[in-house]
Image (spheres, helix red, strand yellow):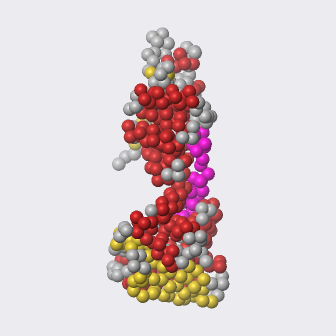
Amino acid sequence: MRHVRLLALPLLFAFAMPAPAQQVSDKTLDKLEKARTANPSSVAALRALGIAYYKRDRFADARSVLDAARKLDPKDGVSALYAGLAAEKLNDFTGAKDAYTSYLQVGKTRKVRNDIRARLVALSRAELHAAAKAAIANEATIASDVGNPRAVAVLPMTFSGTDQTLAPLSRGMSDLLINDLARSPELQLLERDRIQAMVDEVALSQSGRVDAATSLRAGKLVRATRVVQGAITQTDSRSLTVNAAVMQVATAQQQGRDVQSSDVLDQIFTIEKNIALGLFDQLGVRLSAAERAAIEQRPTRSLQAFLAYSNGLVAEDEGRYGEAARFYDQARSIDPNFGAALQKMQSARAAQAGAQVTSAQVESNLKNSSEGATVSAAERGVAATNTGIGSTLASAVGDINPSAANNVNTSTSSGTGQTQTQTPPTTRDPASEKTGTDAPATKTGTFTIVIRRP
């Protein structure tokens, strides 16, 4: 392994710290609107105006202008970031995720990238519920959609019994069935989270009523052609009976016969495998020997670990991410080989962290960066231009080794609000002009590039 050590050249690109979030004045906004009118194809002008609109809580206007800037320059991180913030304020979670994902690819500020990674996890559930509400609002249109003939939705099972601590098994059983039915390439299983979100929204639209008709309606709204409905019944203190059936969404008719399996509680995984194999028969799927062997695998052999995992699913479905993470961690502690519990715990913790990320925190973490300087300039009515390798290196060095030169802004503005590039005087460099000293601190940094042998 060879190490190539590069010493960055002194960087005289100086950046101003972004000012605290402030309300952009009418005068400043008018100045930026004129700059946009004078040069409608200027990314800098569009970006600055979009930020100003966002600061004025004009989120729809901000989104429109920032999206235009993104089309002109897909690599502009600040435009992507503020487009995402504006989209989220408008409850357009899909648009926010798209913009945030772009920022992760082109954004320069490390702390903000960390915030956005966490925020994206939390946005996923909000996006699912927003999509469910939109589907209900457009139900008449969706009803005419035949859907994918391979699409199957396994709906949350119902539970009846005297021991309500076992009720979460209804979520866990559905989760197991989805994973097992997905073993066959002949079927396209819809995500459990998406189905649960739809069932929840349909129930809300029906004043909380959930029945067989609700399940079929949810299946139609997620564009499944067939749904699996089921029920878990506690027959005595130590025994369970599980029933499941395949329903055709278009006709609301059952396909084939019921699938049933009964056994003692400790044999719940055997019950689930019997149900899965029976459902394959009703769905008309013939399994290969390899597929059947894969289905016979058990994610855990501990009933207590699986019950904790099922409690985690319930908590996560209700947005209680911290509690969900604790349940998943409990399942993993009981059975360290329970891989699904570990994955779910990590996801729940990320969602919990993302739910705590605010737009104010994101903007605060732009401080001491070139992107923060761009935002600060927009708040003052300046369409700043920070592009090229110099800006990229300066941003990286600023993250590692902040200096006094960070507090200097390279952008200047004319009276018309358009950005101008000043010609440095022959006797004094730009940083000296800005700091008022003949010996300003320069920005230096050391980068280590590791090249591994193939």
Magenta-tinted stretch: 343-365
- Which residue extends farthest front? 140
* Whole-percent x, y for residue 365 in the image: 58, 40
* Whole-percent x, y for residue 178 in the image: 46, 73
- Which residue extends farthest top? 427
* Whole-percent x, y for residue 75 in the image: 41, 39
| Image quadrant in which the N terminus is located | top left
* Whole-percent x, y for residue 286 in the image: 33, 81
Residue 378 visible in the shown view: yes
In the displayed structure image, the side of residue 241 where residue 181 appears, left or right: left
The count of marks equals: 0
Q: Residue at x 48, y 62 (%)?
A: 137
Q: Main secondary structure of the magenta part?
A: helix
Q: Residue at x 57, y 18 (%)?
A: 435
Q: In which quarter of the image is residue 74?
A: top left
Q: Residue at x 61, y 51 (%)?
A: 356
Q: Is residue 350 magenta?
A: yes
Q: Residue at x 53, y 89 (%)?
A: 262
Along the line of sight, the residue nearer the viewer: 297 or 321: 321
Residue 429 higher or lower than 340, as above or below: above
In the displayed structure image, the side of residue 51 where residue 143 appears, left or right: left
Along the line of sight, the residue nearer the viewer: 73 or 56: 56
In the displayed structure image, the side of residue 262 where residue 304 appears, left or right: right
Along the line of sight, the residue nearer the viewer: 298 or 200: 200
Q: Does the magenta stretch include residue 201?
A: no
In the displayed structure image, the side of residue 270 where residue 305 appears, left or right: right
Residue 146 higher or lower than 418, as above or below: below
Residue 12 visible in the shown view: no
Residue 45 higher or lower than 439, as above or below: below
